């Protein structure tokens, strides 16, 4: 009797996406098979590296040694704002050192990453051609990064239409679907806030959010309901506790990875039950 095929969907979340490494590390140690991967934005980066054959421990070592906190501004290459303020060339040059010039057909695990056609609003799933170019399209946060021109389309961050690509791994014929959501869900409320005077109960803001954080939070608010819909399609949902970590908080990389490990450990029993059924 053949075993069930396991697919994992890795959601977007910038720095929080480092938690995916912790999740994958636990699944590897527990010998949970991963037969297919789909990734969005940060999930596309981690997913591509894992699909190439790197272990989670190797990915962790490489990304921590990159010292993203120190190098984040070195990766900023300001461009004339045609489709985005940052061209993304420096970032893609850095990623090329790790992803390389590989084709999807060279990958050890079937992989797909998602992006959004900014002109039509369509979700575009890429699973052929250059892995590096596909990842570049998936991580292009609108306005911040220039759109990626790919096969006569202008593509941006896949999280704009699907934060966690569960439907994609279903289309890849996964029997068991695992969704990893690294963006804390926004509590739904009907409460309206009328500001008439200062609220003494609120803590003062530590610092003003930067443009990148504002854009990423904007996308998260827009996609909170869509994310909920995607998560409902998954057999297993893994959600690391990352509420206190911002999108640009790369200095908390080790904490993100650790939270990913904790969340994966919590889900192990349910995953093993599905595999044994």
Image (tube, rainbow, N blue to C red):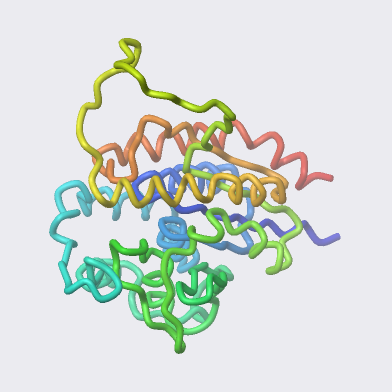
Count numbered badges in the picture.
Answer: 0
Residue farthest top in this picture? 200
User: In this rendering, is residue 61 above or below 97?
Assistant: above
Residue farthest bottom in this picture? 152
| Residue 67 in the image, given as x and y percentages of width and height | 20, 49
Looking at the image, which is closer to me, 262 or 252? 252
Looking at the image, which is closer to me, 193 or 102? 193
Q: Quadrant of the N terminus?
A: bottom right
Residue drawn at point x = 64 percent, y = 57 percent = 166
Give left or right: position of 110 versus 253. right
Quarter location, residue 131: bottom left
User: In this rendering, is residue 125 above or below 37?
Assistant: below
| Residue 109 in the image, given as x and y percentages of width and height | 56, 68
Residue drawn at point x = 69 percent, y = 42 percent = 271
| Residue 27 in the image, given as x and y percentages of width and height | 56, 45
Looking at the image, which is closer to me, 11 or 84? 84
Residue drawn at point x = 22 percent, y = 51 percent = 68
| Residue 142 in the image, given as x and y percentages of width and height | 36, 63
Q: Quadrant of the C terminus?
A: top right
Residue drawn at point x = 48 percent, y = 43 percent = 182
Give left or right: position of 67 versus 21. left
Looking at the image, which is closer to me, 211 or 44? 211
Give left or right: position of 79 versus 203. left
């Amino acid at each position: 009797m053949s075993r069930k095929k396991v697919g994992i969907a890795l959601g977007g979340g910038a720095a929080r996406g480092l938690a995916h490494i912790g999740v994958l590390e636990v699944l590897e140690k527990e010998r949970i098979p991963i037969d297919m991967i789909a990734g969005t934005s940060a999930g596309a980066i981690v997913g591509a590296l894992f699909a190439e054959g790197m272990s989670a421990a190797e990915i962790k070592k490489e990304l921590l040694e990159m010292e993203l906190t120190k190098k984040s501004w070195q990766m900023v290459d300001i461009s004339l704002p045609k489709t985005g303020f940052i061209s993304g060339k420096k970032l893609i040059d850095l990623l090329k050192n790790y992803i390389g010039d590989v084709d999807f057909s060279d990958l050890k695990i079937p992989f797909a990453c998602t992006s959004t056609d900014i002109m039509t609003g369509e979700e575009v799933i890429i699973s052929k051609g250059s892995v590096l170019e596909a990842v570049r399209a998936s991580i292009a946060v609108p306005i911040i990064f220039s759109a990626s021109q790919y096969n006569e389309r202008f593509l941006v961050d896949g999280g704009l239409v699907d934060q966690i690509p569960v439907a994609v791994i279903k289309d890849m014929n996964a029997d068991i679907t695992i969704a990893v959501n690294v963006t804390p869900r926004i509590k739904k409320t009907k409460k309206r806030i009328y500001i008439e005077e200062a609220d003494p109960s609120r803590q003062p803001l530590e610092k003003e959010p930067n443009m990148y954080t504002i854009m990423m939070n904007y996308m998260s608010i827009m996609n909170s309901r869509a994310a909920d819909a995607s998560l409902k399609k998954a057999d297993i949902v893994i959600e690391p506790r990352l509420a206190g970590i911002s999108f640009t908080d790369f200095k908390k990389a080790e904490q993100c990875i650790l939270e990913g490990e904790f969340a994966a450990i919590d889900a192990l029993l349910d995953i093993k039950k599905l595999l044994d059924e």
